[in-house]
Amino acid sequence: MLYPEIVIVGCGNPLFADDGFGPAVIEEMQKLTLPDNVKVVDAGLGGPHFIFTLLNPEVTKKLVIVDIADFGADPGTIAKLRVEDLPPGSYRDAHSWDLAEPLQRIKDQIDITIIGCQPAKVTDPEFELGLSETVQKAIPNTIRVILETIGVDYGTTIKRLQEERQRGTAKSCGSAETS
Amino acid sequence: MSKVVEISPTTRHEGHSKLVLKVNDAGIIEKGNWCSITPVRGVEKLAIGKTPEQVPKIASRVCGICPIAHNLAGTEAMEASIKCEIPKDAKMLRHILQLANRAHSIALHDILILPDLYIPGTEVKVNPFTPEEPVRSVAKRIQRIREIGQTIGQIAGGECIHPSNTRVGGMYRNCSEQAKTKMYDLAKEGLVLAHQQAEFMIAVLRNYQKRDWVDVGGMKVPLPKDLGYHDQGYLATDAFYGSSSLEECPSWDINRFKEVRPWDWYMGEMEISLEEPKYPVGGTTKMGTKVNPQMEACTGIPMYDGQPVEVGPRARLVTYKNFDEKGTVGQNVAREMEYQDSFYEMIDCIDALNPSGKVMADFVPDGDGSLGWAANEAPRGTDVHIARVKDWKVQYFSMLVPTTWNFATCSAALVGAPWQLAEVVMRGYDPCVSCATHMIVLDEDNKLVAQKLIQ
């Protein structure tokens, strides 16, 4: 199967500064050894037409989307969002015939979590490479939240990430408190 | 008296574009402008000073739908500039990746055009998402072909969307014997499905072609027999993959190409004088709105031998396989005919692939600043990247993407069609607008005019 039980997708465009947060998280996650039923994908801008419209609810049970999101918090803050929390038009697939949002189509069959990071700057339509420092620092914590969401205990790595968090290098949201 | 109608934004394709149409009393297009309204970006500028490894990665991020074509064309433009010949097995992996992407892309395009077409023998338009037969099994087949395309692409390219396996000088790693077998099995399964899917699509397209009228938002629109005809000529560099040297493809000479300003080709300021609230989705632009395609268009007009040309599946079939059907239906039929071809060729490439062969060139030069270019036959047409590399730094980089070629050609093809069918003609080009929009522009004396068109 192309997409297994758990799919983690990083969305965004690294050419627009902090918009590259999703792909940056995925790049780090690809260094981890994860169970066979987990797949991490750097979707770039292709999430809607490459992945969200191609998931088979009989196989894929959990979808985690990593992206930037504006929820008015300090830059680098991360939050767990549900599909219902997204503004209309999010992840619209230009290729769908009625402009329906593909996530709305699958949200009742697949458990979808969106992990959003408040960006410091998005330069669209001008190109700029590289994440801002605050957003860069949110990456370890985001990975920890993702692993917790999919129920993977990554042992010492998690502990190390937790320490980093306690040192105050990244902030966590309420729902992602450590146990 | 002519009236002006605008369809904005156009739907069922990637990016933002619009159609501004001057129509006669019968609603037939006298002059059509199809223009991109995705803002100009500056990937060419961003690339300067970066390493040749970085630039194809940057290039592949300009668009959500064609990263594979941009990645391959970008990498090969670098290789052409530094004069690096890659091993045969690396070439095979790239061919497989590109063909898998093409199969996926045709399947996606099927979903896009199906809602314009009718189920043969009925007055019902196809809804690709209906749970009812016979459409349900067609949709399932389309999804399976997309899945096969992505899986093969992932094996050959490392990742299915942004391939991580390509390197300047070859590929990062070859695949295993088992992976080769898996690709082979998938390609064989895909071939059968591609045959079925192409047959179905061509039957539905022929049924559409035979109709006298079609329904658009409740309007009964006459269907002309010459829908989408144009006399602009074709450009293709290879039946399947592409070319990066004059020796391989003598008919694609970069010196015969130039790009001109959009304001010589598009109409000037006008006022909307025809409004149709019934037009799907959400009606056309309101009466009295001012439009100015000359200033709003975000792309230059590329010309080959002084004329805009068509690129894409039909251009490839006309150039290499004696295909001769014109018009929108012909174009869609050509795309369907590429289905099986892409799987047959893929199987040949997998056969030729030696999993224990080397995939990296022994020596990758740093580059002496010569101009190199690569034309990759992307699903939508010829994707040309041009680069100059010196001492492992990119000095110059430019992208000339398929849909940019097709903008002016499609605008010419709109003439004579009822305005309600303008989007049908446009979709025949399978446009991908967001990557079509970032160009350096020359005027007709080959002088550098503008780095950026929008002030």
Image (cartoon, helix red, strand yellow):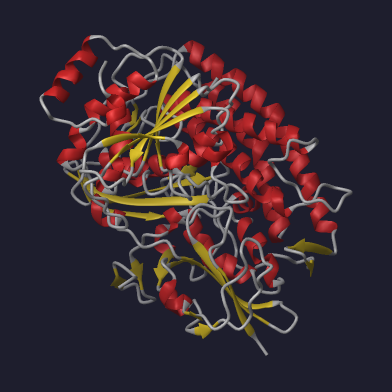
Q: Residue furthest front?
A: A174
Q: Quadrant of residue B324?
A: bottom right
Above or below residue B173? Residue B285 is below
Q: Seen from this angle, which residue lies furthest bottom?
A: B1
Of the 4 image quadrants, the one containing the N terminus of chain B is bottom right
Residue closer to the observer: B14 or B265? B14
Res. B322 visible in picture:
no
| Quadrant, the C terminus of chain B | bottom left
Name above or below for residue B5 compared with residue A6.
below
Where is residue A80 drawn, in percent x and y? 35, 33
Residue B96 percent location from the top left of the image: 51, 30
Q: Nearer the viewer, residue B252 or B428?
A: B428
Vertical arrangement, residue B261 with respect to residue B134, above or below: below
In the image, residue A148 above or below residue B42: above
Observer-nearest residue: B9 or B195?
B9
Res B227 quadrant in image: bottom right
Kindly tell me whether residue B171 is visible in this rendering: yes
What is the count of numbered marks?
0
Point out residue A88 in the picture as x, y percentages from the top left corner: 48, 50
Q: Given the current orientation, which residue lies at the most extreme top position?
A: A155
Is residue B287 toward the left or the right of residue B80 in the image? right
Q: Is residue B154 left or right of residue B319?
A: left
Q: Residue, x 52% and y 30% (percent of image)?
A: B150
Looking at the rendering, which quadrant does residue B420 occupy?
A: bottom right
Residue B58 at x, y percent in the picture: 31, 44
Farthest-out residue, left: A167
